[in-house]
Structures are given as C-alpha cells and as structure tokens.
Image (cartoon, rainbow, N blue to C red):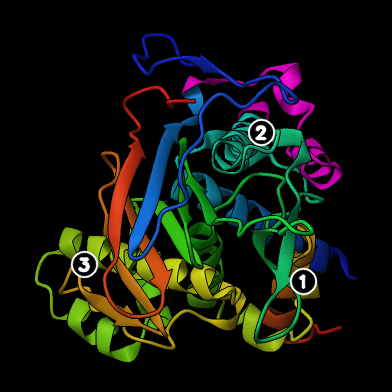
Amino acid sequence: MTPSGRADVAAITDDLRAFLASATGRDELRRIPPGTALFGPAVGLDSLTGTLLLREIQRRFGVDVAGEDLNLDSLATLGTLATFVAQRTRPEGGP
Amino acid sequence: MPSGSTVPQYETAVPGNAVSVRNAVPSSDMVDVWWFDTRAVAVTPAGLAGLDRGERSRAEAFLFPADRHRYQAAHVMLRQVLASYTGTAPGQLPLGREPCPRCGAPGKPVLRPGPGAPAVPSFSLAHSGDMVVITVAGRPAGADVERDGDRCVCPLAGDLHPADAAWVAGLGDERERHRAIIDCWVRAEAVLKCTGQGIGHGLGGFPVRPDRSTGLSANGCMVRELAAPPAYRAAVALAGTGGLTPRVAASWTSPLPL
C-alpha cells in the first residue's frame, strides 16, 4: 500500500471512531485500537449502532460494505473495515 | 456504579446454592418480563463461577471494564432467572444455541431439555446501554431493547419493510420519526430472535406496523411494544397466533425478586 493509502486508512479509521463515539455518546471509543473487533464483544456495540455505522459508511464513502464484501471479512476489526473502505474509495486503489 | 445513583443494589447468587425461588413457566399467551439495570448488579466471583467457558472468554474480550461488567451482569442474572424456573443451579443450566433456520450458523440461545426432564422454558435476553430485559415463556419468544437517544437514526429507514418505511417517512416531526424507526427496529429484532433467524439476513422482510402498539402479527409471531425505562424502546414477540400478554416479573426500578 502507498503512503497515501496508509493515510487514507488512518483518516477513515479516525472518522469511524468519531462516528461511533458520537452515535453512542461514549468518548472512549475515540481511542480504540485498529485491532478492535467492532462486531464482537470488544466494545459492546448493539445491533442498531452496528447497522448505523454501516449505513454511515455508505452515505459518507459510497461503500456498501455488507453488499460488496460477501464474506464480511472486512467486519473483523476497525482496521479491516477502514482498509476495505479505503480500497473501495481510492480510484487507483483496489486489492 | 456512578455516584449519586439511586438504583437498588443486589448481588449475584452463589452457584450451587439451593435455588430459593421457583417460578412457573408461563402458559398460553403469557410472557414473563424481567428488567434490570446492570449498574445495580454487583457481580461476585461466585456468580462469575457459574458462567460457562464461552461466556468467560467473551467477557475477557471486552476492552472497557464497564462493557465487561454489563455483559457479566446480564449473563449471571440470566442464569439466576432461568434457575428460578427450572430449579437447576445457575452454573449447571444446559445452555446451547439452535442453528439459524436460514443459514445454519449458531443462533438463538436455548435451554436444552435433559433426558427425562420436563419441558424447559424458552427465553430471550436483550441489552442496550445499562438496561437488560429477559423474557421467559412456554414457547419461543424474543425480546429487544434499544436506546432512544438524541442521535439521528434516519439512515436505518432503508432497512425497514417498505410499508413501514413509507409510514415513518410521512411523520412530520423528526423526533417522532426517530422513535418510530426504533420501534420498528425493536419489533423486527424481537420477531427474528423469536424465530431464531439472525438479523444479518435483514429485518425488513415483514411489516411491524409502527402505527400500532399491540395486536400485531408478523412473520408467524405475535409482537407488541413493551413498556421500557425512560430513553429506551423495547418489544416482545411470541411464536404462533392468538394473544401476547407480558407480565412484569421485575421492573428496572426495583431489585430482582431472586
């Protein structure tokens, strides 16, 4: 991945953290590491908030994660989700 | 436990103790509803000892102690509630998961009947924020609770059944729209938890009529709204047709009668 790709991932990761903190009213979610399993027990997201996150990604980045990643591997952690979104939004990018 | 809170305190019981309260499994259209506030639960080492390996490893995976506490409190109390119906010690309850009817993945948590044992109750556990609701019934039931906060939930309208989404879109007040979306969500999730189908398959496959609060039938279940703590919305579903009558066994404002 290019340096600019890494920057994309870092910026998207921060965006997702900020959204989660705002949607849950929990400021500590601004500091969660990229390895955090968002849809596992790690931070206790409820199903409604998890879905809201995916809809926000669709609105902000135009990426339908659940529709485009059939194995849902990208949902494993915050970092895999941000990487998937970065790959789908960079025109020259892609896996 | 935040300072200044007035929620009642109670401790989780010692597994292996004689179970002191026995509740009859609800019959017919009745569903027992147990609410509690996880801030009020002091999780004890003895209570934790009743959790199984899977529950312990999930608890270990939480990043923040407050989330771990909510999970542990919910599961220790779930075991105590179920023990009060079956007479089985909390740590000895044969809990398992039924396969999702759509994809076969491990899904709905169930109590497995032992050899020669009488029928076991069906249950459902839901939590959101600090609140937990457990429903117990004689046939498959499902419950859901979600926070009804200040956040905008309009992006979820696209996940609802088209008829419900259209009704929500017709509401003039933004706050009312948010509440109606959450009402649809908790009803659909309660129905899917009742049938055992994971919400990953979508929850807009059937209408749940946000314009009504009771007397609803959806996807082979009865479903209705459930009185919930302030700033939360909740629903309960029961398999089959006919009535659905919730009976509050414990309120979020009082200690669990266990």
Checking the image for residue B72, the label placed there is 2
| Percent x, y of residue A19 | 52, 53
Taking B54 as reference, is B210 left or right? left
Q: Are marks 2 and 3 on the same chain?
A: yes
Checking the image for residue A74, the label placed there is 1
Q: Which residues are magenta?
A: B40-66
| Percent x, y of residue A66 | 64, 80
| Chain of residue at mark 3 | B
Residue B147 in view here: yes
Helix, strand or loop under label 1: helix
Check contact, mark 1 vs mark 2: CB within 8 A.
Answer: no
Checking the image for residue B244, the label placed there is none
Label 1 amino acid?
A: Ser
| Chain of residue at mark 1 | A
- On whether residue B26 falls in the magenta region, the answer is no
Quadrant where the N terminus of chain A sits is: bottom right
| Chain of residue at mark 2 | B
Which of B224/B88 is in front? Answer: B88
Residue drawn at 35 percent across, 53 percent down: B151
Label 3 amino acid?
A: Arg
Question: Residue lying farthest top?
Answer: B4
